[in-house]
Image (tube, rainbow, N blue to C red):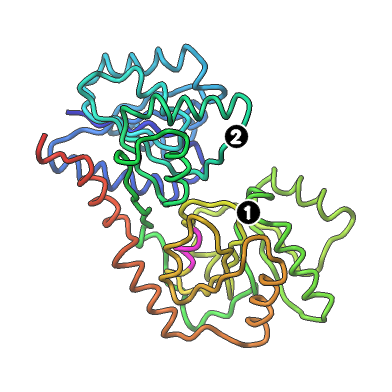
Amino acid sequence: MVVLQACAFAAPAPGNFISSLFSLEKSLADKGIKTIYAFPERAKDKEWCKEIEKRTKVYFLPEAKARLRINTYKIFRTIYRENKVGIVHSHFELYDIPATVTAPKNARVFWHLHDPIMPGNGLRGILWKLQYGCVGKRATLLAVADYYRNVAVDLGFPKSQTEIVLNGIDLQRIMKKPAHVIPEYDFLTFGWDFERKGDDLIIRACDRLAEEGYQFKLLLNGNESTWVKLDKFLGNRRPAYLFKGNPVANVSELFEKSKAFIQASRRETFSYAVCEAAYAGVPVISSDIAGLEWAHSLSSVRFFENEDVDGLYTQMKALLDGKHIPDCDIYASQEYIKANLSIDAWVQSIISYYNIEER
């Protein structure tokens, strides 16, 4: 039997997602089961994708309007014709419909809901109702958050065919922050999506702190599209506290340089960044939003209400005033993540849902 991982993923860095798939692939190989992959064409030149191609088959799919393009369906038919696929596992929504309607009748289909879907109107609304209310009846939905699982159910997906599977982080990828290192920045945030990640909320809270005379540094890690929106938001201002950063190969370097991590997102499912920061030993200030319910089990995370700039300001001010999160809370978060939110735990969950032993 062959497992197909169809992933709408083409990021420059592999991150926890690709690391998770690698670990799953290895565990399946130990059981004599082969894994093949399908990615957007844009993934072809990524080093992590080239590494996959060295050991197994990789197919490339259209990305723009992929649900509507005939070629997407043709490629999936080719995949199924050339391989004895028994399990289809589609990630990030884009390929759910074509991967499912072309799948062999005896194949089991899993849709992995990583993204914060929202009900909508127009073509997007029609597609989601078709996807979750019609085509989805053949699939099992693996969601990373209760809230968005329920959104899919409201769109028509059978609730009895849904499961919650929290993501896991690569513990080997995250180095715990050395106690002797003096951080360069007071705050770090990953703000590649300006609106969704709440960059504007962070800037407003920072402006207030700066006006009150606080001296601090914020490292806003983003990309070229981030800077266009950031510059538009700031106008001609160039705040002294603000430093721009770009993606790095080793995210531990950023945590080591920072006293605290801010996650001000308006929408998330499972925030890898919050989990990684907490495991690295960095205090976290996070918006209290759907998809972050699990983070309430981490004693080193402090919350503020979604879009509440005053609440964010208060939490940032407390850290600048020296109200540090105790080491015992940092340690407790690390131990919780190690026990419950590792890639190993994630792999075991996925394999249990595949129910391979009984096939």
Residues packed near mark 2 inside 10 Å, few (<14), some (14 to 19) or many (20 plus)? few
Mark 1, residue position: 197
| Residue closest to the eye, 12 or 195 | 195
Picture quadrant where residue 206 is located: bottom right
| Residue closest to the eye, 277 or 137 | 137
The residue at the far left in this view is 358
Q: Is residue 277 left or right of residue 239?
A: left
Residue at 40 percent across and 25 percent down: it is 134
Which quarter of the rendering shows the C terminus? top left
Q: Are the residues tagged 1 and 2 within 8 Å (C-beta)?
A: no
Which quarter of the rendering shows the N terminus? top left
Residue at 52 percent across and 83 percent down: it is 325
- Observer-side mark, 1 or 2, equals 2
Q: Amino acid at mark 1?
A: Lys
Query: Is 51 included in the stretch rendered in magenta?
Result: no
> Between marks 1 and 2, how big is the CA–CA gap?
20 Å
Picture quadrant where residue 343 is located: bottom left
Residue at 50 percent across and 83 percent down: it is 180
The chief SS type of the magenta part is helix
Q: Amino acid at mark 2?
A: Gly
Q: Which residues are magenta?
A: 273-277
